[in-house]
Image (spheres, rainbow, N blue to C red):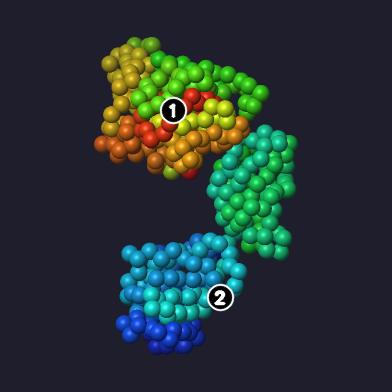
Amino acid sequence: MYYFIKHKLPAFAMAGVMALGLVTFSSCDDDDDDATPVVQYIRPTDANVADSLMERVSMGQTIAVMGSGFEDVNQILFNDQKALVVPTYVTDNCIIVTVPTSSWTVQNDSLTLITRGGQRVQYYLPVNKTAPRILTASIEYPKAGDEMTILGSGFFKDDDQLSVSFPGVGDVPFTYVSENELKVTVPEGVVKGPIRISSAFGSGKSSFNLMENEGILFNFDEGLEQQGWHPQKVVTFDGAIAGNCLQLGDGSAKLEDNTWDDGHFSFEYWAGSWDDPEVFDQEGQGKALYNVADFSDWKNMCLKFEMYIPKSNPWANLSMQIIFAGVKTVSLSGNGGQSAGANNAHFQGENLARAHYNPWKDNGGSFDTDDKWITVTVPFSSFTYGQTGTSPAQTLTSSADFASLTMFIWSGETSGTECYPIIYIDNIRVAQY
């Protein structure tokens, strides 16, 4: 919660605020050119309430520090926690800064400005700790016994009041890693619903559900099946989440810089039918994906899926290019002349927007999931690349662009090494992001 003084401060009262709130310490060797900062007041950055003054702030809140002599400020502390100082957000009269989200060791209830010449100015400004915020869980379709990593902020242990609750189970034991990370061994009995975390400062729940059954496009057990030129294996194995999953690669198919192997590394669902004219709103197979799930708020949505890559066959080169396309780009038949028909031309070029997913690049050049399932989240806002990773001339524009889906490991990032990956995928779905 943000706290504001609920009135405008008259000009004649500024001196009083400064006298109460400002203490200046100067080093012995101050540069004469090093101006002494003067903090007059703190205000929100929201223009609608910019004339309200703030008597305290909350972790993660972006604020405007108003005053004079700020041009030499290069460090800012809230209690003893350093904030990121962005030079372009510092002028002589205003500093825009975000309150750190880490808790403090020493609490002095002060905003401290430090200049290049060593001057320190303190201004009375208490910081509120915030309620837990859950960002991600390493696996959203967990099995009993799985270790789940929960990432977020505000996991404060004050007064031993931190707790984690799973849907269908209630409070569960957890291992505290940091204020931003917890680990949980998943118990039996988890059902659809959000994770909840509570602390002395409030409670928060995940924006996603565990065991989600809405927005599903493909689960490889029922519903839509692959539809294109290159159907891949649909398999089950002892480590599968439940039932069948998609398999890309077989352990003998190679990925290297010049690989084009849609026979092993391409999942295709090209909407449409063999009717003349071709149709896209039929029940069942061939239905356009925008008639399967609601894409109306696509700008604030994402694609999710579960992925399992065994340690024996890691992924170490090329990008998974994730391509949604409208019926005028690709379809099953093209009958009637109102749709494009089947083609692999849309894989290529820089015009059609797609996401590039290449986790090996940021994981030491090789990636596996340690013989367990993880949840992958790809926001639609990241569909901004062409074939080679450059910005496209065209982008996603409407829900009509979400008729078909292709996931093809090819081109894109080519700085990796030769590999023979096996990639299992399940529960391809769309969700709010």
Q: Which mark is residue 109?
A: 2
Q: Which residue is mark 1?
A: 418
The percent position of residue 350, horizontal first and vertical second, equals 28, 32
The percent position of residue 114, horizontal first and vertical second, equals 43, 75
Q: Secondary structure at mark 1?
A: loop
Q: Secondary structure at mark 2?
A: loop
Measuring 37% from the left and 28% from the top, which residue is drawn there? 257
Q: Amino acid at mark 1?
A: Glu
In the rendered view, does 191 fall on the left or right side of 61?
right
Measuring 39% from the left and 42% from the top, which residue is drawn there? 381
In the rendered view, would you say 288 is above or below 399? Answer: above
The percent position of residue 361, horizontal first and vertical second, equals 44, 39
Depth check: give the residue in front, 214 or 154. Answer: 154
Measuring 28% from the left and 29% from the top, which residue is drawn there? 349
Is label 2 in contact with label 1 (beta carbons under 8 Å)? no
Q: Which mark is residue 290?
A: none
In the rendered view, does 115 fall on the left or right side of 55?
left
Between discs 2 and 1, the one toward the N terminus:
2
